């Protein structure tokens, strides 16, 4: 009896090792450093150090558009691979499990395609350009713009760093947009409210990702132990604790109001939480969606705005600043609102401003790291067999810096987006995808 059990276990082990070797052998046919198909330690370590993306881009320079970057991980950088990877046939990998909020999968972390489609639909229309630039949202944007300008005026000479005004302004706008008055922060005025922004800078997050990638079981056990012993203040076991705590408490207040059939004020009625609730998303699923979207928006908007201001502040870019000023000064009074600021509709039509933002998104996209997907069966992409279960992703960093598509790729040069032929623009746009692609492209793109 024992011998039979032993034989059975040994057979399973042999099958497992053979399948692993088979997988590695298939990956070994893909260009890349020879040791890569065997381990993921190096790539996870580089991620921990914050240099994975640039390392992968350097591998593309050396080995071409398809590279095996680790055991079970392949990166691509040709435009033809984008629609093949970000398709309905692929699914998100376990990488996204790290972003599960309140034990719930949001439309960002859902694996099942139909479930994702149903959940995403109401949010996609909420974030559509027309909705965002009308009614309560427009009033909110105007109010926040004025608050920001007032705060800036008080800072003359600019003692505080601009960053210290931008992050709280984004937080105040996004919390009001997502939660209405129930969860709107006043971070521009209150340093306590502004503490949510500290979550974005916490360095422990990378270590947590590394531990969960390399030692998933150990990391899981350590998390349980730390929480049980009440040591989570010293060893953070959750990412973005303040942001999620704010989201949880705001959802609780909202839920109480709804269950008591209390009337919501105009800003709260127009907010994402109320509108999503009206379209049938309730309970902790609603709490998780809102907190997750707040996080996505804070990371992305801070990154893009601060990158744009940083690059424009360089002495070498003064001519770009001047051209932007000229474009704004040339606006007729009819394009301005009552406070003398250009409306959102006006801004979306300013060619130079848009070229500056596009160039910022090309060089400094907020999510330039891998957006991994996997397939349930083997697929052929760009002539290489990618075994089922392999994590495949595009290298945005390498695509956005392809010198054949973007000459002088490191140069911040908004003019490259202006006065170009249709064919040239099409070519650049094929390589430009800061918002990802396919059904799971950014919901907040507009
Ligand atoms: C310049 C600003 C932004 C950029 C460049 C950006 C970029 C991206 C990218 C690349 C993805 C795909 C991530 C992946 O598949 O791993 C994504 C997804 C997503 N983004 Fe954004 N984002 C921006 C702003 C926002 C804002 C303001 C929101 C507000 C709600 C938002 C909400 C989301 C959501 C919910 C998803 C998941 C979509 C899905 O899986 O169906 N993003 N974004």
Image (cartoon, grey):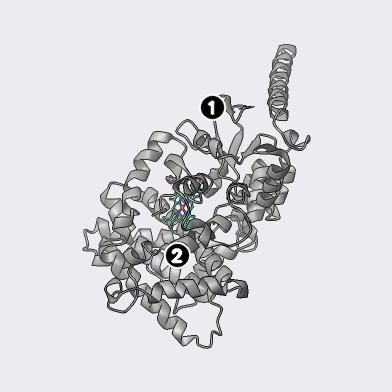
Report the mark closest to the observer, 1 or 2.
Answer: 2
Q: Is residue 242 visible?
A: no
User: Compared with residue 82, is residue 17 higher up or lower down, i.e. above or below?
Assistant: above
Residue 292 in the figure: left or right of residue 66: left
Q: Label 2 belongs to which residue?
A: 352
Quarter of the image for residue 175 reads bottom left
User: Which of 95 and 13 lies nearest the eye of the viewer?
Assistant: 95
Q: Quadrant location of the C terminus?
A: bottom left
CA distance for labels 1 and 2: 44 Å
Asked whether mark 2 lies closer than 8 Å to ligand 1, one says no
Q: Earlier in the sequence, mark 1 or mark 2?
A: 2
The residue at the point 44 percent across, 61 percent down is: 354
User: Which of 189 and 183 lies nearest the eye of the viewer?
Assistant: 189
User: Which structural element holds mark 1?
Assistant: loop
Residue 214 location, x and y as percent? 69, 43
User: Which of 423 and 273 lies nearest the eye of the viewer?
Assistant: 423
Residue 296 location, x and y as percent? 47, 56
Q: Label 1 belongs to which residue?
A: 376
The residue at the point 67 percent across, 54 percent down is: 207
Q: Quadrant location of the N terminus?
A: top right
């Amino acid at each position: 009896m024992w011998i039979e059990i032993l034989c059975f276990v040994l057979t399973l082990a042999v099958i497992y090792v053979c399948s692993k070797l088979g997988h590695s052998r298939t990956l070994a046919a893909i260009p890349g450093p020879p040791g890569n198909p065997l381990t993921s330690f190096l790539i996870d370590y580089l991620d921990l150090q914050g240099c994975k993306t640039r390392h992968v881009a350097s591998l593309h320079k050396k080995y071409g558009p398809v590279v095996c970057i680790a055991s079970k991980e392949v990166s691509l950088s040709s435009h033809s691979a984008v629609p093949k990877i970000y398709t309905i046939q692929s699914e998100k990998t376990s990488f996204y499990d790290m972003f599960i909020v309140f034990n719930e999968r949001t439309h960002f972390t859902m694996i099942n395609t139909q479930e994702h489609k149903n959940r995403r639909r109401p949010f996609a229309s909420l974030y559509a350009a027309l909705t965002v630039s009308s009614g309560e949202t427009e009033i909110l944007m105007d109010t926040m713009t004025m608050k920001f300008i007032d705060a800036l005026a008080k800072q003359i000479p600019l003692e505080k760093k601009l960053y210290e005004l931008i992050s709280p302004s984004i937080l105040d706008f996004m919390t009001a947009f997502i939660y209405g008055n129930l969860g709107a922060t006043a971070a521009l005025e209150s340093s306590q409210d502004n503490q949510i922004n500290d979550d974005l800078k916490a360095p422990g997050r990378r270590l947590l990702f590394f531990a969960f990638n390399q030692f998933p079981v150990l990391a899981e056990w350590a998390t349980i132990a730390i929480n049980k012993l009440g040591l989570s203040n010293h060893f953070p076991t959750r990412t973005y604790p303040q942001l999620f705590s704010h989201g949880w408490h705001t959802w609780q207040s909202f839920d109480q109001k709804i269950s008591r059939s209390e009337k919501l004020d105009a800003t709260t009625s127009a907010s994402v939480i109320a509108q999503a609730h009206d379209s049938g998303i309730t309970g902790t699923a609603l709490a998780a969606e809102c907190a997750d979207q707040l996080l996505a928006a804070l990371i992305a908007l801070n990154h893009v705005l601060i990158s744009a201001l940083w690059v424009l502040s360089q002495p070498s870019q003064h001519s770009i600043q001047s051209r932007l000023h000229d474009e704004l000064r040339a606006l007729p009074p009819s394009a301005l609102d009552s406070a003398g600021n250009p409306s959102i509709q006006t801004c979306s039509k300013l060619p130079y401003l848009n070229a500056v933002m596009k160039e910022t998104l090309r060089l400094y996209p907020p999510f330039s790291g891998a957006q991994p997907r996997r397939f349930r069966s083997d697929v052929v992409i760009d002539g290489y067999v990618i075994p089922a279960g392999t994590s495949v992703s595009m290298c945005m960093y390498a695509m956005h810096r392809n010198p054949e598509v973007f000459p002088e790729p490191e140069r911040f040069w908004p003019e490259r987006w202006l006065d170009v032929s249709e064919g040239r623009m099409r070519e650049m746009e094929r390589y430009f995808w800061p918002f990802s692609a396919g059904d799971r492209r950014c919901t907040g793109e507009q």
